[in-house]
Image (cartoon, coloured by chain):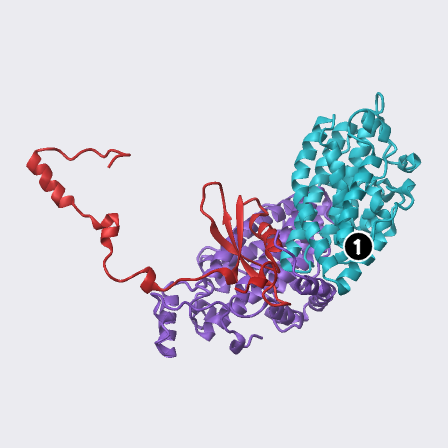
Chain colours: A purple, B red, C cyan
Amino acid sequence: MTDPLALDPVLPLRERSALPFNDEALDHGDRYRHFEEHVTGGGKVEATDWMPDEYRTAVLRFVEMHANSELMGVLPEREWIMRAPTLRRKLALTAKVQDEVGHAQLLYRVAEDLGKSREAMIQDLLAGKTKFHNVFHYPTYSWADIGIIAWLVDAAAIVAQQALRDSSYAPYARTMKKICWEESVHIMHGRDVVVTMATGTPAQRESIQEALDRWWGPLMQMHGPRSDRAKDRDLHWRIKAKTSEELRQEFLGIYVPRIRELGLTLPDPELRYDEAEGRWLYGEPDWNELRTVVTNHGPRSEARLQFRRDEWAATQWVRDAILGGPRAAVA
Amino acid sequence: MPADRAGGAAEPGVLEPWEVFRQEKDGDPMKHGGSVMAPDATLALHYAREMYSRRQESVHLWVVRRSDIHDLADLDLLQPPLDRSFKKPGGYVMRDKLAAAREASGQAKPKANKGQR
Amino acid sequence: MTDPAAFAPIAMDFDGPGDGRERALALLLLSMADDEFVIGFSDSEWTGIGPILEEDVAISSLAQDELGHAQALYRLLVDVVADGRDPDAWAYDRPPEGYLHARLLDHHRGDWATTIARRYLYDTADAVRLEALAASTHAPLAELVAKIRREERYHLMHVQTWIERLADAGGESRERLLAALAAMGPDAGTVLAPLPAEAAIVRHGIMAEPFAALEERWRDGVGATFRRLGLPGLPVTRDPGTARSGHSDAFRALHAELTMVRRSEAGATW
């Protein structure tokens, strides 16, 4: 876990600005109060601003887990890059996984500027000290999984990411704009794979339904248990804008009809939209499973982490070579 | 910056951040896009291309070593507090004076004439 | 001269009418398309596990570029052969022995030094081949080659940067590069080994010069770079008669994986 004391700002602080919390003449309590007022009032924070340790740590933890998830999220789909059944699918999947690596880069850059080095973040991830999202701890069994992941896992993620475009931490908000723009194509790719299989041979259709049945539980858990808005520090600091339940409702509202129009069924007999309550009702997701999985006890947690450790070790010499070798002239 | 750093890493063993500026289309200004980690300018440019134009979203890229950027955010210098309205068009309010002049000359208010002041 | 019998089972199983121009053209297109297809697969194995995140994204772009070139070349082939097979059928529905890629590309993906060495040897040879096709009498090929060459410029810049770094870094880096070059060096010349249809290819102006002339020019260029970097010169091509046939177990394993989903439901739309 991140030690706040280790988080010295890596960028020089602004000497002065109109924002009162940047005023070094004030004592910590006043600066904290001004900062809190600024952020809760909708103000944005830049990497060069003064910020209390609580905020810096909270943003870092949030962004770091997001970055970890992009990096680990590469692995389930990567297994199928070599198996994609047509040239176009091969190109699309390679490009999608590439984007996820790119998003990891963008997010680690945001986190790095908060004071923790990329190397330290990767070491913590590999050591199991930091977390990544639940959906990336599960195995993939078929090409249908690739369709379901690209469509629905990405859709659930994009619902959350769109809400992050308003994050109080401006470098993160800007990064989310770029990421959302790039991700929109993933959902199209995934939906196209699913629709093609759902309208394909009986075996393809069965395969898609089977994958959907397997992924539905993790998808319902993905945004996390319902939480108390008042107690959520990430909401307080406006690092994020919406609660887990708001995100889940949004996801269900858009995607349940789109799944059902394909003639696919969802493995939750209680799932329905309640007009009177104006929200989706659903069977209680298995929160024990979520806790087990995100603490790296999921079905593929250890295997994926070990794979990452092995690959990271196998390329250490390359990093050493480009950093330690004779200086090349600038082109 | 020490002169011997040209083209090399700041400290051995550490990739350095390079800020990336991109022009989206011909005629646009260069805008900050983000940053990449790289050991030198050559790879920084390769990586800027990958991170900021792999969907052909740029027509021109710059990379600048972050440590070569000099920062000015001092509001006493940038936003001095005393009146500078004489430097801005909004500092010249003559509506009432023009109305008085028109009244004196018996002329109507001219119609909006785009392209002329 | 590459042994024509090695190509007989698959590559020559379409009827080329007339004086052999179509057949020669098809053989050239298929060999080039398969080269790009197979190196694209090797490179795409790095997606998600590259040595630096930024480099991971870069190698993935190279893979996509090569696969895009393969797709475009298969399309040209489809127009020439016109036997009902589409580009995907050409790319995926042949047995391993039906592929005509050069033996250089038969090596396992290997470590980063192997990847850089393979990319360097292939890209430099491919650049010479593309140059010789720039004024091809087959206009669709000349047009495509003009576009491919614009993309390959970046590939050459990228791989040049890396081979210099790996060679200059010394220590483990240089040793790994030397090991990769020792393993692949004898196969490097297979990219420009003469095709059985070479006489027709040149006679019809599909390619400006015979392969031997291309290979000589390529060896001069690579030799100069290697001398500058203190790397040993490239050996002569081992067993040029099977330059594009008799593929390795590494390729057979790759082929089994890349056709896995497609074979699972033959004839389905994906």
Q: Which residue is depicted at the point 69% across and 41% down? A: C68
Q: Inspect this view and state whether residue C222 appears.
A: yes
Q: Which residue is depicted at the point 38% across and 70% down? A: A22
> Whole-percent x and y of residue B102?
10, 37
> Whole-percent x and y of residue A263?
62, 46
Quadrant for the N terminus of chain A in the image: bottom right
C246 displayed left or right of A83: right
Q: Nearer the viewer, residue A22 or A243?
A: A22
> Whole-percent x and y of residue B21?
50, 52
Q: Quadrant of residue C32?
A: top right
Q: How many marks?
A: 1
B25 displayed left or right of C86: left
Q: Nearer the viewer, residue A84 or C115?
A: C115
Q: What is the crowding at mark 1: few (fewer than 14 residues within 10 Å), some, or many (at least 20)?
A: some
Q: Nearer the viewer, residue C40 or A286?
A: C40
Q: Nearer the viewer, residue A52 or C117?
A: C117
Quickly name the residue at label 1: C231
> Whole-percent x and y of residue A145?
68, 54
Q: Inspect this view and state whether residue A260 appears.
A: no
Please, is residue A165 above or below residue A47 in the view? Answer: above
